[in-house]
Image (cartoon, rainbow, N blue to C red):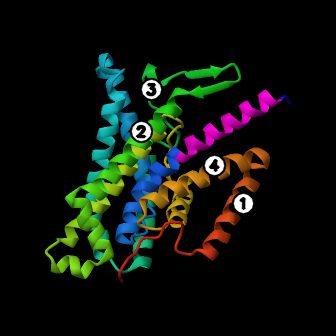
Amino acid sequence: MTASELSSILLMQGFSGLSLFSVLLLMALGLAIIFGQMGVVNLAHGEFMALGAYVVYLCSTVVHDKFPAFAPYYFVVAIVIAFGVCALMGLLVEWSLIRFLYKRPLDTLLATWGLSLVMQQAFRSIFGAREVTPTLPEWLMGSIKPTGNIDIPINGLFVMGLTLVLTAGVWLFMFKSRRGLQMRATVQNRVMSDAVGINTRMVDRFTFALGCGIAGVAGAAFTTIGSTGPDSGSRYIVDTFLVVVFGGTASLMGTVASAFGIAQGQSISEFFLQGTMGKVVVLLAIVIILMIRPQGLFASKVRQ
């Protein structure tokens, strides 16, 4: 193998790691908001991602059957619709289920696990057991060839761009808006937040809906790089929790750094080792780091 071929392979592996980083970060942003801000272990988070992917599939089917002239533009609108549908679903779940289980983490875990099974069966009954794929616009197809040996898919670049925009949007919301300030205040001291007039129940409801909406956007992005099935969300939920815990709960910077480190670690280790062994090496490294630093990479200061 020549030096040029080796550098091309390493660059392609690096890009593959960036694609995985984008998916993990999109998934982890919503989960970090829910788990970090509310302490709710939402095992149904992956199913909200799948819901967003199915919404995009439905939009694709309707547009190509009824309004083919809008086919080149529908995808951007579908992302917004996926966010709205998942946020509304999250709002309903928080109101009907989660609000009765605060400060009962084991019950919350079991309840959201049951919800994930119900949602998976609902997907299976409505869309069937087979995986589905929306028809993507032409501008998302193809690839860019910066050199003869390097082939970069456009859909991967789109997912990275969407991840950057969404991450910047979440940061601006959390640190530059009044609602974001209320969310951070509720995390740091719920009793004091109540005392100064912040409606912490509404903050919890809004936080859960926002996290589910972001999961819907992750599902929309996922449709550009893979097919969607009833259990698509469950494939990523363990890695997503790993990202949130390793980065440090309630830390946006920690979530970004953790997703980047885990994705690049998996991509490079799976190239030099077998797929399963690569994951084992990454998981072992994370366990050792968490034994030394159990609060994660960037832990937030929280008053209990």
Quadrant in which residue 42 is drawn: bottom left
1 and 2 marks in contact (CB < 8 Å) = no
Q: Is residue 279 left or right of residue 97?
A: right
Whether 6 is among the magenta residues is yes
Task: Please identify the dominant SS of the magenta region.
Answer: helix
Q: What is the crowding at mark 4: few (fewer than 14 residues within 10 Å), some, or many (at least 20)?
A: many
Mark earlier in primary sequence (1, 2): 2
1 and 4 marks in contact (CB < 8 Å) = no
Mark earlier in primary sequence (2, 3): 3
Q: What is the crowding at mark 1: few (fewer than 14 residues within 10 Å), some, or many (at least 20)?
A: some
Which residue position is annotated with label 1? 280
Query: Secondary structure beneath disc 3?
Result: loop
3 and 1 marks in contact (CB < 8 Å) = no
Does 212 appear above or below 146?
A: below
Query: Secondary structure beneath disc 1?
Result: helix
The segment highlighted magenta reads: 3-21
| Spot occupied by residue 301 in the image (x, y as percentages of width and height) | 40, 75
Which residue position is annotated with label 3? 136
Q: What is the crowding at mark 2: few (fewer than 14 residues within 10 Å), some, or many (at least 20)?
A: some
Whether 177 is among the magenta residues is no
Query: What distance separates the C-alpha of mark 3 from that of mark 1?
Result: 35 Å
Name which residue type carries label 4. Gln
Quick one: which residue is furthest to the right in this view?
Answer: 1
Which residue position is annotated with label 2? 162
Which residue position is annotated with label 4? 264
Name which residue type carries label 1. Val
Name which residue type carries label 2. Leu
Query: Secondary structure beneath disc 2?
Result: helix
Query: What distance separates the C-alpha of mark 4 from that of mark 2?
Result: 19 Å
Query: What distance separates the C-alpha of mark 1 from that of mark 2?
Result: 30 Å
